[in-house]
Every structure is written in C-alpha cells, then in structure tokens.
Amino acid sequence: MDGRSDDEEEEEEDARPMPRMTKISRHTFGSPSECCFSISVIENMEEEYGMFVWPCSVVLAEYVWQHRSRFSGASVLEVGAGTCLPGLVAAKLGSEVTLTDNSTRLEVLENMRRVCDINQLNCKVMGLTWGEWDEPMFSLKPNIILGADVLYDTKDFGDLFATVTFLLERSPGSIFITTYHNRSGHHLIEYLMVKWRLKCTKLLDAFSFMPSCKATSLSGNIQLAEIMLEEPSH
Ligand SMILES: C[S@@+](CC[C@H](N)C(=O)[O-])C[C@H]1O[C@@H](n2cnc3c(N)ncnc32)[C@H](O)[C@@H]1O
C-alpha cells in the first residue's frame, strides 16, 4: 500500500511517457455481490473537452451498466466519445464497440486507443466529425449510438443530429442514448425532436437512477434521453 486512493494513481505499467498533468481515474460498476468490474481512464487535466471524464459520461456509463442485457452482443458506436467511459463499459458487457471523436483531435483518438489497451478491451477507434461524410461512415451500422455531453454547443447541434439521424436511418430499430446538461432549463429535447423528426422514447433525470455513492459527486440538471426515428426506416 502506498497510501494513494484507488481513484487516482499515476501510471506505472506502461513505459510510454505520459503527458504532464495526466492521471488515471478508476470507475467501478456493480457491487461486490453482483458481477463487478472497474474501468481505468487516462485523463489530462490541462486539456479541454475530450481529455477528461465529464459527469454526463459517468451517468451514461452507469446507465449502460444498469441496462447490461441490452448491450450483450450489440453493435455500439460512441460519438464525441472523449475519454469514452460509456463505450468501454459496453465493450466490457459484450458489445462490439466503435469509439469516435472529431477527426482533427488526434490526441483524443490516441488517448482512446491507449485507454482500450490499459483495459484490455478490443474496440475500434476512428475519427468521425459530425456533419462530415467520410468513407468509413458508410460502413457503420450500429444498433445503439451513445453520446455523453455532446449537446453543449448549440452551433454543433445541426451537424450532430445530421450524423445521428443518418446512422439511425441506416439501421432500422436503432437508438441514440445521450446524456446532457440542461443548463438553460428549457425544453431542449422536445425542440430538437420536432426539428429532426425524431422521437424521445425515454427522458430521465440522472438522479432518478444513479446510486447514491455516485450521485453525491454530481451537480446540475443532467438528463438522459433515448431517441429514435419518428418514422421507422425501411
Ligand atoms: C464535452 S466533451 C464530452 C466528452 C465525453 N463524451 C465525456 O462526456 O466525457 C465533447 C466531445 O465532443 C467532441 N466533439 C466536439 N465537436 C465535435 C464534432 N464536430 N465532431 C465530433 N466530435 C466532436 C469533443 O472532441 C469532445 O470529446
């Protein structure tokens, strides 16, 4: 024992140098009485966005764990994945997972590969910039799309939903599960559903399902939405 907590420890096993201000956080799922595992995530506190675990990611990862029967054998794509905790939990539960983030954020994509390695999870990692239609997009056919805190900049909403709607249309019956901070308190999801001809089949307050040990570190109004096409595609 060296006195450090489980949640924060410096990396020791990997010989590759870690950037400054990097730490590994550990996220545990389940209780000792049921199937229980932990995922380690490399975070860089100097960077913005995609290099640390946002609260929405913790909430979505917990939801994936609680709905684990849906993820066994599923084809899962995480968009704007950043440190990719929800996608890693899905992989641990037996999904075939593709982790994606903005194609220009090479450091984020590299961090994802490294996080997969340290957790010994075999996920595909690729650049996917919302609103851009690169060749690899056309090979994707996920039945579950995950997105944690991807609704934070209104200027990106159009591109994000263009991509998500395209993917939902490619795979009949597929679903987009997203968590977001409702900072304005307005009816954001209702507005977006009408605009993109989508329907929200479930809308939950994060505090309604987070275990108390994880809820204490959350603040603000975090919601989880499950979203499908309004009209099923043929
Ligand atoms: C607030 S962070 C959330 C990261 C992670 N999902 C989490 O919750 O910890 C938003 C993520 O969206 C990604 N992103 C932003 N704009 C994007 C775009 N146009 N296309 C793809 N990804 C984008 C960022 O690189 C970043 O990883």
Image (cartoon, grey):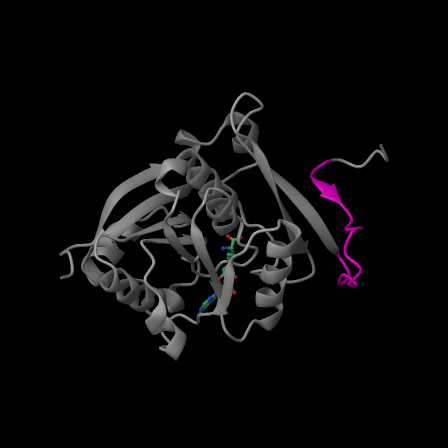
Up the image or down, 158 lies above or below 223; here it is below
Residue positioned 49% across, 58% down in the render = 81
Q: Is residue 48 visible?
A: no
For residue 79, side relative to residue 125 (left or right)? left
Residue positioned 35% across, 77% down in the render = 133
Which region is colored magenta?
Answer: 6-21
Which quadrant would the N terminus be assigned to in this image?
A: top right
Which quadrant would the C terminus be assigned to in this image?
A: bottom left
Coordinates of residue 34 in the picture (x, y in percent)? 51, 24
- Is 32 one of the magenta-colored residues? no
Q: Nearer the viewer, residue 24 or 192?
A: 24
Residue positioned 77% across, 51% down in the render = 11
Coordinates of residue 22 in the picture (x, y in percent)? 73, 56
Q: Quadrant of residue 33?
A: top right
Q: Please tell me whether the stretch drawn in magenta is mainly helix, strand or loop.
A: loop
Residue positioned 56% across, 60% down in the render = 50
Q: Is residue 164 visible?
A: yes
For residue 70, side relative to residue 191 (left or right)? right
- Is 16 one of the magenta-colored residues? yes
Number of numbered discs overlaid on the protein picture: 0
For residue 13, side relative to residue 95 (left or right)? right
Q: Nearer the viewer, residue 127 or 140?
A: 140
Q: Residue furthest top?
A: 33
Coordinates of residue 86 in the picture (x, y in percent)? 48, 48
Coordinates of residue 208 in the picture (x, y in percent)? 39, 30
For residue 234, side relative to residue 164 (left or right)? left
